[in-house]
Structure formats: C-alpha cells, structure tokens
Amino acid sequence: MKLLYIANIRLPTEKAHGVQIMNTARAFKQGKDIEITLVVPWRLNPIKQDPFLYYGVDAVFNIKRLPVLDLIPIPFFKPLWFWIESVTFSVSAIARAVFEKDAVFYTRDFLVAFLFALFHKPIFYELHTLPQKSSFLHNFVLRKSMGLVVISNGIKKDLMRFGVSEDKILCAPDAVDLRRFDIVISKEAARKTLNLPLDKKIILYAGHLYKWKGVNTLIEAAKKLDADMLVYLVGGTAEEVSKYKIQNIKYKNIIFVGHRQHQEIPLWLRAADVLVLPTSGKEKIGREYTSPMKLFEYMASGTPIIASDTPAVREILHETTAIFFDADNPNDLAKKTVFGLSDCAALKTFSKKARETVVEYSWSNRAANIIHFMKNILHNNGTVLRQTSGNTYKELGEILVFTKTDFWRTLIIGEAIALLSIPVFQNIKVFDILARYNHGLSFFVIGLWLFLLPFMTVAGLYGAYLLGMRWRSSIFQIGKYGLIGLLNTFLFAGITNLFIWFTDIARGWQVIFFTIISSIITITHSFFWNKFWTFRAHNTDNGRAEYIKFFTITSATSLLNIFLLHIIVNVIGAPNGIDPKIWVNIALAIEIPIAFFGNFFGYKIFVFTHHGRDAI
C-alpha cells in the first residue's frame, strides 16, 4: 500500500505533535507492504537540525516538502498568515495527489481532509478534537472521509452522536517510543547530569503551558508546598515561560525550565520524585478529548504519577497505576503530592504497574491498528480507484485522462490569466481602492493573486475531470474549453485594457481599433490551444481548412462582439458617475457568454469534426 501522510507542520518543531507525526510515520513503515512518504510544507525554520536526528527517529521513510506561502514569521496578523500558509499547503498537497497512482492519504489537518474529500481522494482523517458545533464543512469531511481515527473514546462518542457509523471510527490513543525511556541511569545520576539538587523533592511537569493543560492548578498547588519541594515545569514557548516567571517571581520553589529537546526528556522524567498531569476538566478538550503523549512518557519513565481525575485520563490510568486528584483543585493536588511523597512503597508499586501497562501503547502497536483499520475499509469498499497505468480511467467506453501535461498547462494558463488581469484591475480601480486602506496592500494582493490563481485553475479543471468520470466525459472537455475561453477572455481584455491604460482613451474609434488588434491575437492563440488540447485534433492533414473554418466562426462572433462594444461604449456611452474605463470592461463582460457558447458549438460541430482525433 502506498501511503502519503500529509501533515501541515514545520519540521522540526518545538510542538509536541511533531513527535507524534514523526513516530507515526516511522511506525507505519514497519509494515512490509507499506510505502510511506511524509508530506510537509517547506517553511522558514530557526531549527536547522535534521528532523530524524532532532526526534531520534530512524530515517526509514521519505520526507517530501511542498512549496507554500510562508508569512508566519511576520510579527503581526498571525491568524491571517497562518490561514494563508494552510491554504497554500493544502492546494500544493492536492496538486501533488493528482498524480499519485493507487495511493492512500492520511492527515490530521482539517483543510487537507476537506480538499481531498472534495476531490474524491481516499483520505483517512485523524481527529484530536471536535468543534463545539458541527458545521456543514465538518459534516462533509466526516461523511466523505473513508475512515476516522480518534485519540479518545470521548471523541468517538461525539462522532457517533453526529451520525457517524461506529464501523468508520477507530480509537487509537497516542503512544510512546519505549526504547527512548528504557534508560539505564539512576535518579541521582540523572540529577547530576541536569545539574539538579540531590537533597530536594522534585515534582515535575513536562509539556505545554496551555490553560487547558492545567498548569495554573499545579502552580497554585506549588505555593502550598514546603520550600524543599521543588516544582519544575519543563516546556512552553519563550513568551509563555517569561510571562509565568514574572507572575511567580517570588516563589523560589517554582522553576520554569522552558523548552528542551525531546531526546533530553527521559532524563528529566527519571530525575523527578513524582510527575504531575494536571489536565483541566473545565474544557471538553482536556476533560474528554485529550490523549497526551506526556502521559505515556510518564508511564514509560518508571517515575510515579499524580494525575487529574478526568474521563480522558481514566481511559488510560486507574487506581493501581497513579494517584488521582480532583481536577482544577490545587488544594487537593498539594495534599495528594505530600501524601504520595510520604509513601515511597506505594509510589513504587504504582510506577511499576504503569510501566507494565504502557507496553501496549507503543507507536508500533498504534500504527499496526491504524493500518489494519485502513485495509479493512479499503477491502470492504472494493478497489479504491478505478485506475490503471498512465493515470487513465475507463468510463462509458471512453478513456478519460488527466495527465501531467494537463496539470502543467493548466498551471501556466492560470499564471497567464493572473498576469493579464492586472491591466483590467488597474482600469477598474481595484488597486486604487486597496491603496486607500493600505498602500502596501495592493502589492500584497497582487502577489497572493499571482501565486494562488494557478492552483485554483488546476483545482477547477480537476473538478471537471472528476465530474466527467462520474457523469459525462464531455464535462472534462467543456472544462478545458472553459479554461481556454477564460484565458482568451483575459488575453483579449488584458491587451485592450493595456492599450487603454497606456493611451488613457476609453471611447471612440480608437477603442474599436484596440479590440480589433486584440481579436486577431486572440483568434490565432485560441486556434492552437483548442485544436491541440481541448479537442485533441492532432492527427489531421487539413490544418489550413480547419483554421479557415475556425477563423470564420471566431471572426463572426468577434464582429458581433465588436459591434455590441461599439453600441455600448460609443452609442450608449458611460452613464453619469461611471468611469469610461470601467464602462468598457462592463461591455466586455456582457460579451463573454456570446463568445463562449457561440464559439464552442461552432468549433465542435464545424471545425474539429474529423473522426481521427484523439479521444479524451
């Protein structure tokens, strides 16, 4: 099975889900019949280390980086930049997926799952949380995904309430690489290595400092402990750590360590007397949805655990593997911490049982369960794609093909349309309107337009291809013709508007002259695109006759459009309050349907009619 794991993540990253993604990809590869590629965005990254070395993961799979528009380093409008990066990555991912033969796709990113479901790609979607309200888009993804992998039974139950069949859901909690935590070192030796005090009790938390993680509960509990009980918090961004240090500067027994590389975490866990999992129960993500990797790392470390008493945590831990405290209750946490530290024999029993239990939560077991789940669904659904070599599909007696040539031509067409639209936008005052809000906004919009439109055209034509497979093959042909028609429209409008822009003339016989020149260029351009791509009339010996017919039909529709343009621009004229340059473009827009339908049926019936052309 060829599996592409699509992950919108900067590698390597300080965030914990980088560990999950890398270890999951490695574990997928353990299947002898699995060919795995991890697909990630090409982003700016201050961490220059190789991802395999950074996470300590064997380099048994490939990492493919896709181009994205990465504006996230800009220090303002962060949500906007993240949205743009997510969209461009998702578009790049679906563009790559077009040419993957017999591939299955796996992701934990909603936008990726949405696009792949929209394009009928076999996508398996991993969920770590759910929205408070189920929207149309979420329902679409849940319905169209081949299978859903969740990390807790809380998510599974809510999905079933949304109407998702239980057979479509696999509960696969997070896991741990047991080898990394099977270290032969004593607690004292670990403390010496990390330069920690040997004569103090150390209570440790490792993870992010998000509110729902319950860090505030641990901090408040720490304030109630004796001075010889030190609370270490390992993790968090530099900004988070700085904020918490300032807020708690007078408490000497609360130490914020900040981010540490993943390879160092086993030492920190071994150095502690007790590990705390203070997950909050106030939010559903912490109460019912979470399956924190640090919990499994805690269990693998052999160090005793004190954990919040929440349904999500109770799915993994029980009374023989941990001490529980009331979630969000710092007094109870402080009390249970003192109690636990005073009973070393009980703590050792708990930690031993936790170490035995966590064996079943390895990345290998998790990946094996997911692979088994996917194969069952693929088997029950029959052949995933009706696909043969060359990316061809049999449909209603015709061979329908979306080739790499189609992809690159469509990408070029999209970029050409984007460039040709600039004179149009200039004359209809789009850039003037943007400049009123922010002078630099015009340049940003132009850059975004030039980058996104090519991928949007590819998505549009591929959508026509999918519709052609499902209903009528002519839909794909119409899609190609529509794309060439759009290019011709912007070629015609772009050249005309370029003349208007340079001459500042938007009415009179000069405008008609502009349109005649534009028409001649557009007609010749249109002939070759439609002959060799839309209608695929390659093997003909009557090219001259075809061009005469083509020129006759196109000239007829062009003359009709020029006459209408003259009536609208020169006879009727621009109404009061409307700029003549804008009025010319309104006239051009009115003519589009006439040119589209008139030319299409003329070409198909009278021009490219021979029986020797390639089937589509």
Image (cartoon, rainbow, N blue to C red):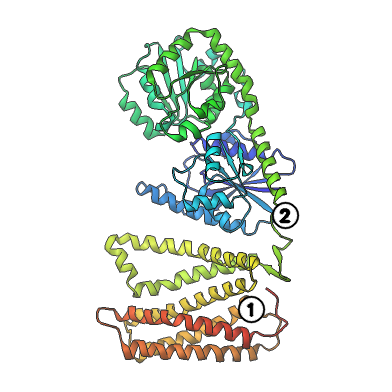
* 279 relative to 497, above or below: above
Front residue of 587 and 160? 160
Q: What residue type is labelled 2?
A: Thr
Name the residue at 41% across, 27% down: 215
Badge 1: residue crowd in 10 Å (few <14, some 14–19, many ≥20): many
Viewer-side label of 1, 2: 2
Badge 2: residue crowd in 10 Å (few <14, some 14–19, many ≥20): few
* 49 relative to 568, above or below: above
Q: Quadrant of residue 127?
A: top right
> From mark 1 to mark 2, how far is it between C-alphas?
31 Å
Give the percent coordinates (x, y) of residue 580. Answer: 30, 81
Residue where numbered disc 1 is placed: 535
Front residue of 323 and 586? 323
Give the percent coordinates (x, y) of residue 453. Answer: 48, 64
Q: In which quarter of the image is residue 549?
A: bottom right
Name the residue at 35% across, 30% down: 242
Q: In which quarter of the image is residue 440?
A: bottom left
Label 1 residue SS: loop
Question: Which disc is residue 383 wearing?
Answer: 2
Name the residue at 42% across, 91% down: 563
Question: Which disc is residue 437 wearing?
Answer: none
In the shown orientation, is residue 589 left or right of residue 316?
Answer: left
Label 2 residue SS: loop
In the shown orientation, is residue 395 left or right of residue 554?
Answer: right
